[in-house]
């Protein structure tokens, strides 16, 4: 089945630094990937839709200059959390869809970000 | 916009049957999905209902009533490994992104 690989699984960084998270589709091409954020015991909140070869589409309230998304190839999307602050500490998960719009999303294993 | 409401927690015993409800309000409707997420893990797809009625996949079944804006996930013969969070989700066909919006989530605890 379709596999989405996300790296790193865990990262701890100091406040003010930037962190890059990679999301790869291993056995399929993904023109669109979705980035979600999840706080403890809460739902998955869509942050942005990553589009290969064009600008990402951000959800309302998500700062595009803080959460930089690059989708430079059909198998790789990256999310960079810039100037991280403790409140950015969260679980970040990417996902992609294979096939039609009705097809299920395949998720990466997520990245646990802790900003100290 | 969309909103999907679920009970926050459900507790049941091994071997029992449990139903997790989902009520939704959406500007358009393009099917209801269910995902399972174990603590700290990735969500995994369980089922999808585009039309009214019951869809069965092994021990899991999912039901949809579009007129009531309501669906549920039914888990039978509960096992300890079913302890997880369950999310309903709807597809937002706004624009060309077909993004998926998730419900509030239900934490299922299966007890021996």
Image (cartoon, coloured by chain):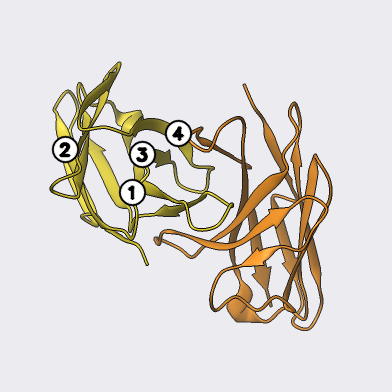
Instruction: Quadrant for the C terminus of chain A, please.
Output: bottom right
How far apart marks 1 and 4 lie (CA) works out to 19 Å
Question: Tag 3: Cα neighbours inside 10 Å, few (<14), some, or many (≥20)?
Answer: many
Residue B29 numbered tag: 1
x 37%, y 67%: residue? B1
| Disc 2 target residue | B19
What is the distance, in whole Å, between disc 3 and disc 4 at their CAs?
Answer: 6 Å
* Residue position for label 3: B34
Does residue A82 appear anywhere in the picture? yes
Q: Which of the marked residues, 3 or 4, is nearer the chain's N terminus? A: 3
At a point 76% along the width and 31% down the height, the residue shown is A26
Picture coordinates of residue B55 (x, y %)?
26, 23
Q: Nearer the viewer, mark 2 or mark 1?
A: 1
Which residue is at the front of the view, B40 or A46?
A46
Q: CA distance from mark 2 to mark 3?
A: 12 Å
Q: Are labels 3 and 4 on one chain?
A: yes
Q: Are marks 1 and 4 on the same chain?
A: yes
Residue A64 lies left or right of residue B7; in this view the side is right
Q: Regarding mark 3 in the picture, which secondary structure is present there?
A: strand
């Amino acid at each position: 089945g379709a596999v989405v690989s996300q790296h790193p699984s865990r990262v701890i960084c100091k406040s003010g630094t930037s962190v890059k998270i990679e999301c790869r589709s291993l056995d399929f091409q993904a023109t669109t990937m979705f980035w979600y954020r999840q706080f403890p015991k809460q739902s998955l909140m869509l942050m942005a839709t990553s589009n290969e070869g064009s600008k990402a589409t951000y959800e309302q309230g998500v700062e595009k200059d803080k959460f930089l998304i690059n989708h430079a190839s059909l198998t790789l999307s990256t999310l960079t959390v810039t100037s991280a602050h403790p409140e950015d500490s969260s679980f970040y998960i990417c996902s992609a869809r294979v096939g039609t719009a009705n097809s299920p999303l395949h998720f990466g294993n997520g990245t646990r970000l802790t900003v100290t | 916009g969309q909103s999907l409401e679920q009970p926050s927690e459900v507790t049941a015993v091994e071997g029992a049957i449990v139903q997790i409800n989902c009520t939704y309000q959406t500007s358009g409707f393009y099917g209801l999905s269910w995902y399972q997420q174990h603590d700290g893990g990735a969500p995994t797809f369980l089922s999808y209902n585009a039309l009214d009625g019951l869809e069965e996949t092994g021990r899991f079944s999912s039901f949809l009533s579009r007129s009531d804006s309501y669906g549920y996930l039914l888990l039978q013969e509960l096992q300890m490994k079913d302890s997880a969070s369950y999310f309903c989700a709807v597809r937002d066909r706004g624009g060309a992104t077909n993004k998926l919006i998730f419900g509030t989530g239900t934490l299922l605890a299966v007890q021996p």
